[in-house]
Amino acid sequence: GELASGNQQSERGADDRRGTLEAEVDENPDNIAARLALARFLEADGDLAGALRQYDEVTARDPENADALAQGGRILYLTASGTSPEQATELVGAARERLDRAVAADPEYADARFFRAVLLAQELLDRDVAIGDAQRYLVLAPNGPFAEQARALLADLDAETLPATTVPPTTP
């Protein structure tokens, strides 16, 4: 029969894609590109834990893989918000450690700079490094996918430098 909606067809296509990616990884566990593709697919499908496992597998094989380190750090940070304060502190620390490693592995990897800037700014950890990372992201990727967010982050961080009770100057 005919499908009542395109959803069944698109779900089947997603299942097929997942199966294909998983088969590629199973056949060649050291295929970094396949693992990264599977991680991105799993994340898009809402499986953050599965995506993180794939990023971990990549860094187990290639400890300096800035993409896997940055994406893994970003996912750890995203998951921190839905946990207890103690767990959140631990996850934020682990996320920062991965993002620091990603930037050290490839200082020119723009996404790592942006992800770390967000974490540092939102967690009030290091305003100056957050500003530097957001600025560096914009130098590396002025029209990148996070450019608008980086500009907004910089504007927010710049606004924080003004005293809360700033009064506009008056003319005599």
Image (tube, rainbow, N blue to C red):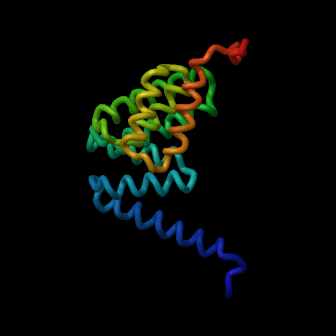
Image location (x, y in percent) of residue 102: 34, 36
Please count the marks in the image.
0
Q: Quadrant of the C terminus?
A: top right
| Residue at left offset 50%, top offset 35% | 76
| Residue at left offset 59%, top offset 21% | 160
Q: Quadrant of the N terminus?
A: bottom right
Q: Which one is nearer the viewer's eye here, 61 or 93?
A: 93
Image location (x, y in percent) of residue 62: 26, 43
Query: Residue 99 vs residue 169: left or right?
Result: left
Q: Which one is nearer the viewer's eye here, 163 or 12?
A: 163
Image location (x, y in percent) of residue 74: 48, 38
Q: Which one is nearer the viewer's eye here, 64 or 9?
A: 64
| Residue at left offset 63%, top offset 33% | 82
Q: Is residue 56 visible?
A: no
Q: Is residue 41 visible?
A: yes
Instruction: Name the image quarter holding residue 24.
Output: bottom left
Image location (x, y in percent) of residue 19: 45, 65
| Residue at left offset 54%, top offset 20% | 124
